[in-house]
Amino acid sequence: MDEDVGTQVAPSKRIIELDIIRGIFLVVILIDHIELYPSGFDLFTGRGRLLVSAAEGFFFMSGLLVGMVYRRRINRGMKFIFRKMWRRAIELWLASIVLSLLFTAAAIYLHHTGIKDGLLPVTNWPHIIKETVLMRYGYGWADFLDRFAILMFLAPFAFWLLVKKKWWLLAIISLVTWAFRGNNFTFSWQLIFAGGMIIGYHWYQLGARYRKLSAQTKKHVRYTVGWVTGISFLLSYASVFILSVLNERMSSLPLWLQHGTNSWNSANAWVWLYSQKWTVGPVRIVLFAFWFSTLFWLVSRYYRRINPRLVGAVELLGRNSLFVYIIHAFIVFGFKLFIPSATTLLENFLITAVALLLLIIITRRYEKWQVSKQPKKAKAHAKQPKQAYLKPDLVKSP
């Protein structure tokens, strides 16, 4: 198997835009998990109720970096690829078990069983442990880890198809699996992860092809993607922040506006029929492709014009995404233990801001601790420009 591995290796560079985007997704995830509305921050996140969410982005980015990073290592052979990916899958699986059992125990013994939906109704620890190990039960705000573990276990087989230049076969397998997904979460979301792998593996070739397009063609592509994203985002945003207000005040609205609101509700229900989040409806998939492309273009074009401290904080979170994802679960749990049942807009803003600040401070200390553990040569290496490396967190480097 190893002798057939391709010889082309992508440049070993860290893409700062991808770190920033991952950081944005993690910020959105924390805000929506704190779930204090209105806070002002919810105007940025859409309260997790838009037609596309940060969760899809996080799955896609994980697959993207699997394809991109391991493409640089194919000269080490497929045995190395299988070993590294499976070791990462085991780490994610063990982390999901520990965190799920820890949050379950904390919710039960602190008498906060209603702190999050999904807690098993009967406290039977042998059963809870068995279901957690078998990945049929997960609890807490890092409950996607077991899904990442499954996808990382399957990733080397998908990567082998990419190495064999059979990306089209991987795409067909992924699409067929998605088509027969039923209500299975992993069968649904693997499509986003696999799509990310395919694009990540061919990242530099796709970039080169795009650069070869004529200026006019590039302009048409940007305008089409931008307009589809803008219109669909505004409609989705309006459904969250305007339609919900109209529904709350339905009885006091004039008759013509009641009819208009009911028609809007019907249209919105039809759109959501094909935009389900749990099973990743087709409309959600298509819109994600447009929204992510627009986000990447916006970040690439404008991040240098934004306050460097703000960009640096978001990039910091993106560079340490797995650590941040786990720590955010502890922050959310801890905050929800003490958040009062009724809060004002100002209190919502302050609580959410403190949670974000705490996440950044902890992550910064973690990164400094990581650097302090490295040998002197590695420390000097780490001080070079950030663009010189590409080290994704869900794809642990050797």
Image (spheres, rainbow, N blue to C red):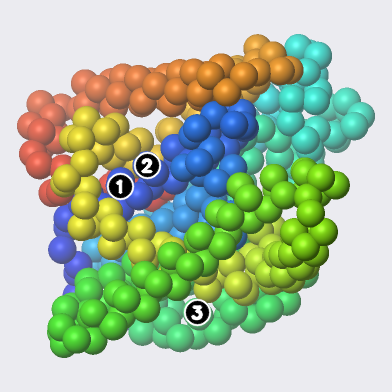
Compare residues 57 and 374 and report the one nearer the observer. Answer: 57
Residue 381 showing in the rendered view: yes
Residue matched to label 1: 19
The answer for how far apart the CA atoms under marks 3 and 1 are is 26 Å
- Amino acid type indicated by mark 3: Leu
What kind of element bears circle 3? helix
**Residue 124 quadrant:** top right
Q: Earlier in the sequence, mark 2 or mark 3?
A: 2
Image position of 11 (left or right of 93)? left
Residue at x-position 23% and y-position 57%: 300
Residue matched to label 3: 170
- Give yes or no for contact between labels 1 and 2 (Cβ–Cβ under 8 Å): yes
Compare residues 254 and 123 and report the one nearer the observer. Answer: 254
What kind of element bears circle 1? helix
Q: Measured from the top left, where is residue 267 in percent x and y? A: 72, 70
Badge 1: few (under 14), some or many (20 or more) residues near its Cα, within 10 Å? many
Badge 3: few (under 14), some or many (20 or more) residues near its Cα, within 10 Å? many
- Amino acid type indicated by mark 2: Gly
Compare residues 287 and 384 and report the one nearer the observer. Answer: 287
Residue at x-position 42% and y-position 19%: 358
**Labelled disc at residue 23:** 2
How many numbered marks are there? 3
Q: Measured from the top left, where is residue 96 in percent x and y? A: 61, 38
